Image (cartoon, rainbow, N blue to C red):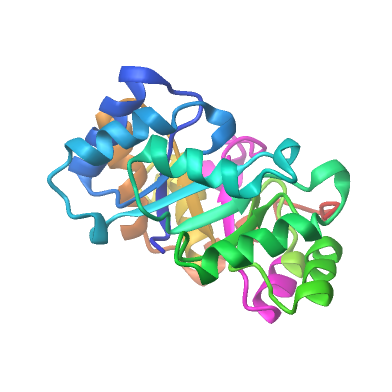
């Protein structure tokens, strides 16, 4: 799974198709969509139009929790819209009714075992909910996608994911972070980059995958270039301390 992925929400229709094709052309290989985004068909049009082989691409989609009991149908509809015989990662978009969603998780594992998805995971799950899935099924999610950034990270949560062999993936890594914070602007100035680049590089330093979105080619290129920004240990530590209270996960 690439550490930097291209997010498609809230783009739809031709805008989404063109954005995904542009993202592929600048070097993205992971595209992130969801049933709830209502753009899977547009993403599928980009997958059909690109010259890149399917084996070079990583496709993530998500099932909304209101589809409990309709997991297989939801996946089949996603595959049809995407024009794929499998997706690389299928996530439960968030806990159904605040519960673990064990019946859905069992359906996810069956879909993985049948080859319809390569890996299964969750989004917006706490440690307790993940442990409940494991107790009932013996299977941990491969990925947990959560809102994560310097403004709202919790090192104890990250360590809990590592202990369970779960990849931590950040959606909206910039949403809760003050990009004008002096720590970020100082680091950015030293490297001749933007605070946005610094936030993405900080995530990658911690082996947290990031999903970023933009419809503009120049912004896509800048986001992807964050992989080349090496932060010093002192800079990483300073950014780590931007969050003074653990988040409630």
In the picture, measured across the screen, residue 129 lies left or right of residue 232, that is right
Q: Quadrant of residue 136?
A: bottom right
Q: Could you say where residue 128 lies in the image, as x and y percent from the top left?
A: 86, 65
Q: Could you say where residue 214 lies in the image, as x and y percent from the top left?
A: 39, 30
Magenta residues (range): 158-186
Q: Could you say where residue 67 lies in the image, as x and y percent from the top left?
A: 70, 39
Number of labels in the image equals 0
Q: Nearer the viewer, residue 56 or 186?
A: 56
Q: Could you say where residue 149 lies in the image, as x and y percent from the top left?
A: 62, 49
Q: Is residue 185 magenta?
A: yes
**Is residue 187 something that shows in the picture?**
no
**Is residue 4 something that shows in the picture?**
yes
Q: Name the residue located 62 percent from the left edge and 35 percent from the top edge.
A: 175
In the picture, measured across the screen, residue 1 lies left or right of residue 94, that is left
Q: Name the residue located 23 percent from the left edge and 49 percent from the top edge.
A: 27
Q: Name the residue located 57 percent from the left edge and 57 percent from the top edge.
A: 169
């Amino acid at each position: 799974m690439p550490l930097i992925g291209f997010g498609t929400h809230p783009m739809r229709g031709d805008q989404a198709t063109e954005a995904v094709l542009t993202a592929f052309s600048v070097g993205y290989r992971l595209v992130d969509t969801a049933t709830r985004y209502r753009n899977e068909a547009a993403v599928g049009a980009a997958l059909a139009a690109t010259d890149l082989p399917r084996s070079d691409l990583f496709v993530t989609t998500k099932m909304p929790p209101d589809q409990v009991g309709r997991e297989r149908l939801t996946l089949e509809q996603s595959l049809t819209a995407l024009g794929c015989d499998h997706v690389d990662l299928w996530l439960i978009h968030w806990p159904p009714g605040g519960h673990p969603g064990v019946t859905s998780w069992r359906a996810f594992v069956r879909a993985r075992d049948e080859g319809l998805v390569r890996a299964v995971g969750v989004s917006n799950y706490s440690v307790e909910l993940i442990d409940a899935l494991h107790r009932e099924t013996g299977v941990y999610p491969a990925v947990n996608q959560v809102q994560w950034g310097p403004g709202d990270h919790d090192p104890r949560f990250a360590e809990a994911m590592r202990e369970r062999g779960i990849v931590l993936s950040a959606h909206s890594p910039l949403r809760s972070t003050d990009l004008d914070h002096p720590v970020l602007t100082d680091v950015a100035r030293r490297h001749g980059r933007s605070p946005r680049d610094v936030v993405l590089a900080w995530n990658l330093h911690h082996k947290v995958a990031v999903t970023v979105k933009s419809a503009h080619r120049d912004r896509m290129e800048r986001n992807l270039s964050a992989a080349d920004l090496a932060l010093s240990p002192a800079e990483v530590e300073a950014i780590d301390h931007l969050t003074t209270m653990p988040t409630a996960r």
